[in-house]
Amino acid sequence: MKKNLRKVMAMMAAAVMVMGVAGCSSSSTTTTDTASDDSADKTVIGIVQMADNGAFTDMREGFIAEMNAKGYDDSNTEFVYKNAQGDATNLNTICQDMVSQGVDLVATIATPTTQAMVNLKSDIPVVFISVSDPVGAGILTTLENPDNNATGTSNAIPVSDIFGLADELTPGIGKYGILYTSGEVNSVNTAKNAKEYLDSKGIAYEEIVVTNSSEVQQAAQQLSSECDAIFVPNDSVIQSAMPAVAQAAKDAKIPVYGSSAVMVNDGAFATIAISDTQIGAISADMAYEILAEGKTPADIPAQVVGATDTVINKTTMEAIGVTVDAADGITFVEN
């Protein structure tokens, strides 16, 4: 059977591989860099992410916790977790390793990782977590009828709701700065949606596109000096440098509206976001259907998970001189 063949491949890969790109997890479930010698007796689930940040950690842990709750735990499951540390070459190697090891399923976190795994066109089912536009990214043809042996969850960024929140919390913004990375299709698409929204409202904006994290601080300082607020799409590069963006905006006394709760935790002023833990758990439910019920990704429509949580950074709020009263549906964080 195909599964048994994968197990044999996993043992062979474990014997010959010396080192992979390492990562760790706080889950109690076994999480390793490569499949171990006893993985032939276990279901092996790969988990791949592009870089370290709090949102991806919450997604991963939400996925693992839900799989544990559904019976995929230490006794019968091995999670092979790898992190590309922001390097595209590492990411491609990691995805190829997953195929070589013959894992039973791969959970991919966010868009670049999912694209890299799906592009290999392997027979290993892929369940993605938090891809903002699976169709636009070329991962699926339609959400309703997944192809490319992949399905999962989409975190479509509620651009109009976030700008509506900005109108409510900091009215009178005449010009937005939009900061994002050219190499992330999810970020490019969200920035495009933001510009279309602002155009429809007759609101001015200035965009700066960076290629790596070393360019973020200078770009944030420029936008802070020329704009009344900054909007950051769902961008892993900018998210990892959010403290620098937030500090530049605080110095200029302007708000930063992000696209995730983690951005707010790291100093952005506010957002309307999904629960990262919840979206990981929903993807785990899909993985369970594949592993335990014998379904294929094509049998499971991809899901758009709505953003419902308004998150405000109280420390940033005070630093930029804004007052927001406590209300139902608002979560305040301090950092």
Image (cartoon, grey):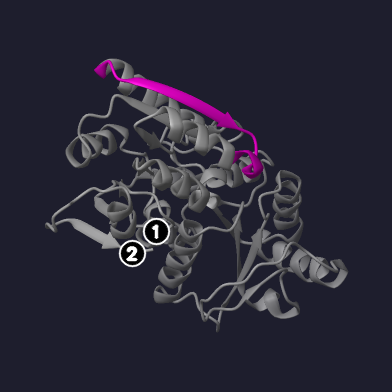
Residue highlighted by disc 2: 334
Q: Position of residue 171 (x, y in %)?
A: 20, 34
Q: Position of residue 233 (x, y in %)?
A: 44, 38
Residue type at numbered disc 1: Asn
Residue 210 colored in magenta in the image: yes
The residue that appears at 39% across and 36% down in the rendered structure is 231
User: Magenta segment range?
Assistant: 201-216
Residue type at numbered disc 2: Glu
Q: Quadrant of the C terminus?
A: bottom left
The residue that appears at 53% across and 76% down in the rendered structure is 26
Quadrant in the picture for residue 232? top left
Q: Secondary structure at mark 1?
A: helix
> Label for residue 265?
1
Mark with earlier residue (1, 2): 1
> Do the residues bearing badges 1 and 2 touch, measured as CB atoms within 8 Å?
no
Q: Position of residue 62 (x, y in %)?
A: 42, 66
Residue nearest the observer in this picture, 18 or 195 = 195
